Amino acid sequence: MKKTKLIDQKIIKLYLRKLYPICRSITGDGFRKSLQILGNKIDLKIFKFKTGSKVLDWIIPKEWNIVDGYILNTSGKKIADFKKHSLHIVNYSEPVNKIINLNDLKKRLFYLRDLPNAIPYVTTYYKKFWGFCLSYKEYLKLKKGNYKVYIKSSLKNGYLEYSDTILNGKSKKQVLLSTYLCHPQMANHELSGPLAMMVIYDYLKKTGPHFYSYRFLICPENIGSAAFLHKNKKDIKNKILAGYVLNFLANGKKFTYKKSRKGNSISDKAAINVIKHNIKNHAINDFTPEGADERQFCSPGFNLPIGVISRNDFNNFKEYHTSLDNLAKFDLDIFFDSINKILQIMKTIEINFKPKSTVLYGTHQFSRRGSKLYDKIFYKRKKTETTKILLEILNLSEGKLDILDIANKKNFSLIKNKELIQDIIKENLIKCKKVNISNIN
């Protein structure tokens, strides 16, 4: 990539302020509005599925929209007020307007004893229901008596939507970046993925075209990726070379990678190479079907090479699916550090190729070739780590292993040795089918 700057922190703060208050769900106006805001930086390509459509084994539900909701307590005061925080209403609640007693109300209330100040996030996408969420501290204040419950919402035939945009490269093979945009009023868990994608898209567009094509999917979690796979199931396996689900990118010191189900895909090899050689505090986890959209991407029949990049997983983020995941949990320094690491992984994928030595029997005679590498390393007796890496690459360049396989096998960073690899190619020590092994800087 040509050298260019990332979108700066002021713009990200502006987008955070715009997106954070919106009540999003897997369908509806909140999702559409959020997509439109991201569309200022991403060239959206919207796809729609009607209510009732079958996508893989899933059925698109009715479209949900909400205007207001609250409980009037025994003193006539509003509590669990939607306009104060959208998590107060169970997502996808059907409309209600009636008076009930405390015992009946309690059957419709959700809270967290272990996080007494938090409003939990609860959904009812596929079951008719209505309910309220509140902090455990508020719950303890409820007194016997009658309560008015009011939710002004609608469940009507409509659409599920997602955006699927491609930046074409020299190759038709694609690197997929996926994120979801369906959680209401949460910061790190919900917005770090879409905003990171916005920054990466802007950067790749300005610095392209690249060798590989890059595909950007923004969808409702789970059912959105199912819809995407349903629409593209005929050719998606042939197109996707590598890919990652992006979430939890703005909070957490430990850079975390969850492998694809394949376990040794180019996605896995590239991420692991960058992580092991560039990030001290990290975790690399095997695939499990528990999680987000990787469940669909790595499901039977598809088994795509899609891993997950995050700074934490939901089991280690105590604010997960609660109101405590607020703007204070969105650390801009961690966010941009995550993006820089993701771009390093993209760079590693771009650099990768299958090298074949120009000498297939024996070793190269550097001295008779007038090699600058010979002068630099051998003649001057500067046998450094670079010397070792050079010889390892030449020794294993039989046209069987990718350069990334060699790097992982011999424990060196691919991107840190990009110039060495370029020199090896320039001096015709190995052959590279790519016209340019990378234009990423």
Image (cartoon, helix red, strand yellow):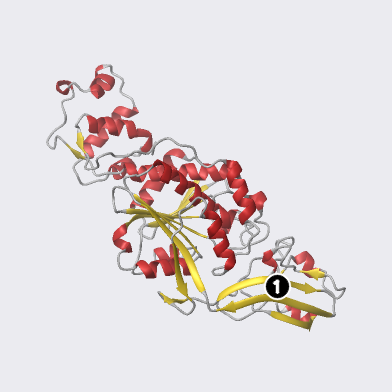
Q: How many numbered marks, from 0 up?
A: 1
Task: Describe residue 151's horizontal placement relative to residue 419 as left or right.
Answer: right
Write the residue at 21% across / 23% down: 371
Q: Position of residue 239 (x, y in %)?
A: 31, 58
Q: Quadrant of residue 419?
A: top left
Q: Is residue 90 visible?
A: no
Q: Position of residue 345 (x, y in %)?
A: 41, 45
Q: Is residue 158 visible?
A: yes
Write the residue at 57% across / 61% down: 33
Which part of the image, by quadrant, shows the C terminus?
A: top left
328 to 231, vertically: above or below: above
Write down the residue under mark 1.
Answer: 132
Q: Position of residue 77 (x, y in %)?
A: 84, 70
Q: Quadrant of residue 88?
A: bottom right
Task: Describe residue 344's horizontal placement relative to residue 159 as left or right.
Answer: left
Q: Secondary structure at mark 1?
A: strand
